[in-house]
Image (tube, rainbow, N blue to C red):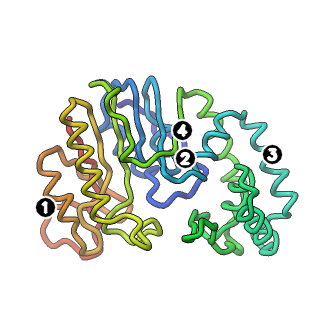
Amino acid sequence: MNFNKEKLIKSPLNYTGGKFKLLPQILPLLPNEVNTFIDLFSGGCNVGVNVEANKIICNDIESHVINLMQDLSNLSSEEALKILKKTIDTYKLSKTNEEGFKRIRTDYNTGANEWYIFYAMVTNAFNYQIRFNNSGQYNMPFGRNRSYFNPILEKRFIKFVDKLKELNITFINKDFKDLNIDTLKSDDLVYCDPPYLITCASYNEKNGWNKTHERELLKLLDKIDGKGIKFALSNVLENKGRRNEILIEWSKKYKVNYLNNTYGNCNYHAKNKSDNNTVEVLITNY
């Protein structure tokens, strides 16, 4: 797939596991021509907004994020920015106003779930992270002296919303197991960037992604392959001394493309690997 590195669009969300830094390695490994591109675990949509396809479908189980993306796709960047800045002013949000952050968080958790409330809240949370407790309450603390809607983030927000207008893109909120593959064709592509089984991100807390989920996804990809549909799977084979034996064994049936990730160059077959190595891969069936 062709791309211009200088024109890559970065998500305005600091999403755990976001693939923006790896896009220059991932995009060239995708097919040159794609009719429908399905981003099954779209997260902050770093991949979805940067692929070339006739139709793009971004799916995620996180309804708060999908609702944000859907609403932004229906607004111009000027409209969205005006609404967002009015919200920031209303709550007097800044990198030092913890009371303002707590007030918008309380309002959000008690029913004010509009996209601008959600996004303004996230931009003032610790490390801009998205996390909910078992009761569905947003529970990230304030990002004092660090997190706020700064000029860099504003430019990223504008570029992202503008890019949505250029794409034939749809946002859906489903469990990955509910993907209907019967309508897909050989020129379509299912891209998966699921939670990683052997990492310690917030999505793995409280059994959020476990071996059962891992096997269900790999079974789905086998089924997709059996129908002659292309897939690409982002994942890690090894992380800080831990190995994903399920994925390692399964991947032997397909092509494993090794990526140089943000932790440094890694090769799964290399000798003298450090325990801190993260072996990140893109597994494809083409």
Image height of 174 relative to 228, above or below:
below
> Residue 83: which numbered mark, if any?
3
Q: What x and y, as percent, mark residue 107?
A: 77, 64
Lower sequence index among marks 4 and 1: 4
Q: How far separated are the C-alphas under marks 1 and 2?
A: 32 Å
Residue at the disc numbered 2 = 10
In this figure, which residue is indicated by the disc labeled 1?
A: 269
Residue 58 locus on image (x, y percent): 48, 40
Q: Secondary structure at mark 3?
A: helix
Percent position of residue 97, x then y: 80, 72
Amino acid type of disc 2? Lys
Q: Look at label 3 and name its amino acid.
A: Ile
* Among the two numbered marks 3 and 2 on one chain, the one whose residue lies closer to the N terminus: 2
Side (left or right) of 32 relative to 285: right
Q: Which residue is found at the position 19% from the left and 48% from the top?
A: 256
Q: Nearer the viewer, residue 40 or 94?
A: 40
Spatial CA distance of label 3 from label 2 is: 21 Å
Task: Count residues near mark 1 (Cα–Cα under 10 Å), then give few for <14, some for 14-19, many for 20+.
Answer: few
- Label 4 sits on residue: 171
